Image (cartoon, coloured by chain):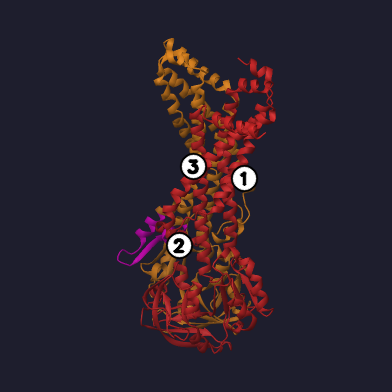
Chain colours: A red, B orange
Amino acid sequence: MSGALGISARLAWRNLWRNYRRTLIMLTAIAVGVWAMIFMSALMRGMTDQLVRNGLHSLPGEVQVHHPDYRADPSVANSMPAPSGSLLAALQAPPVTAWAARVRVPAVIASERESRGVTLLGVDPAAEQALGSLPAAIDSGRFLADAADAGVVLGVSLARKLDTGLGKRVVIMSQDPDNDVADRGVRVVGLYHGRMEGLEERYAYIGRDALQALLGIGAQVSEVAATADDYRITGQWQPGIAAAAGSELEVKAWTELDPYLSTMLRVQDGFTLVFMVVIFAVLSFGLVNTLAMAVFERVREIGLMQALGMQPRMILYQILQESLYLLLLGLALGNLAAWLSIKPLERGIDVSVVAEGMEMMGMGTVLYPALSAQDMLLSTAVVVILGLLASLLPAWRAAHLDPVRAINRQ
Amino acid sequence: MNTAWLLAWRNLWRHSRRTWLTVGAMVFCNVLLVFLISLQLGSYQMMIDNSLALFSGHLQVQQRDYRDSQRIRDSVPAVAALAARLRGELPAAAVAARGQAFALASSEERSFGVLLTGVQPAFEPGVSTLPGLVAEGRYLQPADSDAIVIGAVLARNLRVGLGDELTFLGSGRDGSFAAAIATVVGILDSGIDDIDRSVAQVPLPWFQEVFAMGDQGHAVVLRLANIDAVPAAVAQVRSLLPAAGDLVVLDWDALQPGLRQAIQSDMTSAWFMYAVLIVLVAFSVLNTQLMSVLERTQEFGVMLALGLGPGRLARLVGIETVLLSALGLALGLLFGALLVAWLGVVGFTYPGMDELAARFNMAERIYPQVSFVALLWGPLTVFLFCLLAALYPALRLYRLQPVAAMRAAR
């Protein structure tokens, strides 16, 4: 049997090259299609990755712990104690790689001339650094030195709108737990560039201890954020944190905190598959055509083989093999081309000409295509499975020719 | 002449299955293109219309620096009078004046920084869809003075309901201390958190009084019948403004630069997909026509020997391709138009669409835009590329030697 299979494989391979022009054209078409599938999904994956990362930066930490009422009413009255006991232990154990506790309250910042509403973040710079949630770049001045730092760091565009600058004093006003307005003059010690302008205007940073003192909340915090450095596995460790936090606190994964992001992720995965299937559908017409012609040219030969006792199953098998070789060659070429074209682009494609549009979609100005083995495997699976299914029709027809008629043709 | 066309037509049907498969590839691709392009244009139209209708209008008159800095002193003098004048000069447009300032809004229990917008209750519903979204209570009326309409999320965060009072603290245009109390008369619910968190509208005269604005405001907003009227209106409004002043006319693209760019970047990725589809179909046609030329080598040899010039043969192949592609074009257009017409009635949606829609101010169903461009662009490009694909097989005929061709093995 293995001998027959070997012969059948050799026959299929040689048959493929009998009409090398046709095979080459089809091969090019498959390679172009496969390349497009992978290239496009790499671009889209890069976009979604960035979208999620940017989203997670404006919402740092893939898992957040809050007072149960905080999300509906983000007031300082709904704060929680700093992590201790089992929650602290869970946050310090793998897979959590970093965590931070911060005070996050709505506030008004006023300069001599203007005032703006912001979200004031009282942070511990070292912990936020580990979490990767600090601003992208400091424009001038410095970031906060430690949690006790009483200076504020503002976004560049917020400072412009407030008509203030580095070294100037601003007044921050926020509500304390007794519903009185607590205010305090602070110095602007640094200006930062955010990943997106909208975020730059929304967030102002101050030392956590300084803000706690201003609001008179002792060691209370608004939220605890934790990360495991991979936003796709959050579902695995979020329940552990929730259990450790107890029923008094609300523990949410980013997928629940920002449904838009998780929807985008799902839509992208779905769209990648749809795109691949559509590309393949167009390819399949050519594939079926090529095989049908190959069978048509060889009707007499196939009839003869049947007459000599070759089973229809073997003929079917041989045609499918021919198709498989064609598909695999096209896949190899397409994957290679995709790899070659994406690798140099992985450092980023500058799309700053449409920066504001990208921002509207939640993305930055540099697009990083992400070549993933998953997309390559998916395209291979789509092409091989659907390709063989499409080849079944011509192969089945070949296998069921009437030998006598086939031999006497022409 | 007629014989050539008749011959070409009959040649096509010598291999009817191959012809249908090739036509099928074209039809599939054409229907897909018609569908995607009309859907795309339809969703862009919707995105633009809905985004502009919400708040920003088609164009605005502002002080030169206001768009970037949004400082309270960058104001438009005699704003209501200017709006009235523009209303008289542009009868087709809805015109309303606005003023904006930040203030700390406090209820009995909570305080938040808000962007207060002073509006003309009589004219605001003409330029913005927000007044129509009031879910509780009523919108502002011309006789109102210390009344305010706020978004539902803001109301929830401030813990206020209809009839409750809000205190505002801010700074006036001259730097003076501004303080006032207003009563909540309406709560607006758009279903989009970002909007429901930020809307706070008060009557313009009251706003001007509280913030020491005199007769000044920050913008005159114009909404036109449709987007095509914008360039003419921009020119007309510009000519009506005082020449020496520092007022500028901003069209929707300047007001919301993200919108056009989001559309552009979306288009780029869409064109990539279209290009791939078209190239793949062209390969399919190339394959078919090359096969059909190669298998007729003997026949063409005979025709050459009988004195037919290679030009006539190439034309024959050309006509065959035209017929083949025209068939694909006609059927593709027919099915594409039917599909689009049907979707125009029932609309189109996909999983996850509602959340994306909320982000881009779209409805939850897209209705494709039926236009000649949307209908014809894709199929005509496919047609063109299919003709180009047949060049190579047709040109091969010029290299044919009659004797060698007649002896060629089949």
> Alpha-carbon distance for marks 3 and 1?
39 Å
A115 displayed left or right of B330: left
In the image, is residue B234 part of the stretch drawn in magenta? yes
In the image, is residue B71 part of the stretch drawn in magenta? no
Residue, disc 3: A333
The foreground one among B109 and B64 is B109
Image height check: is A42 above or below B30? below
Q: Position of residue B333 (x, y in %)?
A: 56, 35
Q: Are marks 2 and 1 in contact (CB under 8 Å)?
A: no
Q: Amino acid at mark 3?
A: Leu
| Camera sees residue B137 | no
Q: Amino acid at mark 1?
A: Leu
Image height check: is A120 above or below B125? below
Residue, disc 2: A364
> Alpha-carbon distance for marks 3 and 2?
32 Å
User: What's the mark number on residue B82?
Assistant: none
Q: Magenta segment range?
A: B232-259
Q: Amino acid at mark 2?
A: Gly
Chain where mark 3 sits: A
Residue, disc 1: B343
The foreground one among A230 and B246 is A230
Q: Quadrant of residue B314?
A: top left
> Alpha-carbon distance for marks 2 and 1?
34 Å
What residue sits 50% from the left and 17% below the top? B409
